[in-house]
Image: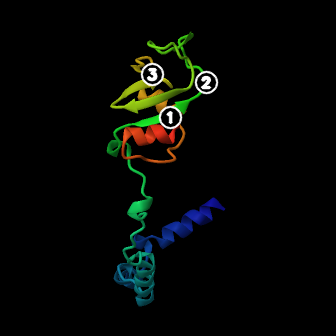
Amino acid sequence: MLERIRRRRRAAEPSQMPPEMYEMWARLEGQVPPEVEQMRAEMKAATEPAPVPFVDDFLPPELRVPSHDQLAGRMMPWKQPLVLDSDMVACAECGAYRDWLILSTRDQIWLRCRAGHQQQETRLNTAWYNRHARPADATHATFEDCLRHLGH
């Protein structure tokens, strides 16, 4: 069986072909039928993406939320006691230990008690703030407006 396959392969090789068959095979080798060229052109046209018209898909300016670099800072309420490194944080001036406002500004974290005293908390960083902060529900033009909004 294998011998028959080897004989057929040898017979099909160009060196074993009769000269007139070899010349015809050599002439047809580089040619492509016109139908194939037409099919290639159709396939190329089908794969090219159609031009997409420009659509302004951004939100209108009144619905856009400012990015972090456009804000002077962010703040969030923290009602429960704040425990850091097994120590409960208390206000240095009045001793309050709950109902904080946590402010994040210029890569610093500040704590503000209900009485209005502020102290920097170096044990916290912006990454901690981002993990614990909820999405912003409002933006305010002034610090006092934000304090009023959060009930301080």
- Secondary structure under tag 3 reads loop
Residue 127: which numbered mark, if any?
none
- Dot 3 amino acid type: Leu
Disc 1: which residue: 76
Give SS at disc 1: strand
Q: How far apart are marks 3 and 1 (CA)?
A: 14 Å
- Of the residues under marks 3 and 1, which one precedes in the sequence? 1
Q: Comparing marks 3 and 1, which lies closer to the viewer? A: 1
Residue drawn at x 44%, y 25% as measured from the top left = 116
Categorize mark 3 by other alpha carbons within 10 Å: few (<14), some (14-19), many (20+).
some
Left or right? Give the position of 13 relative to 23. right
Q: Which of marks 2 and 3 is nearer the N terminus?
A: 2
Dot 2 corresponds to which residue? 80
Q: Where is residue 60 in the image (x, y as percent from the top left)?
A: 41, 65
Spatial CA span between label 2 and label 3: 16 Å
The type of residue carrying mark 1 is Met
The residue tagged 3 is 124
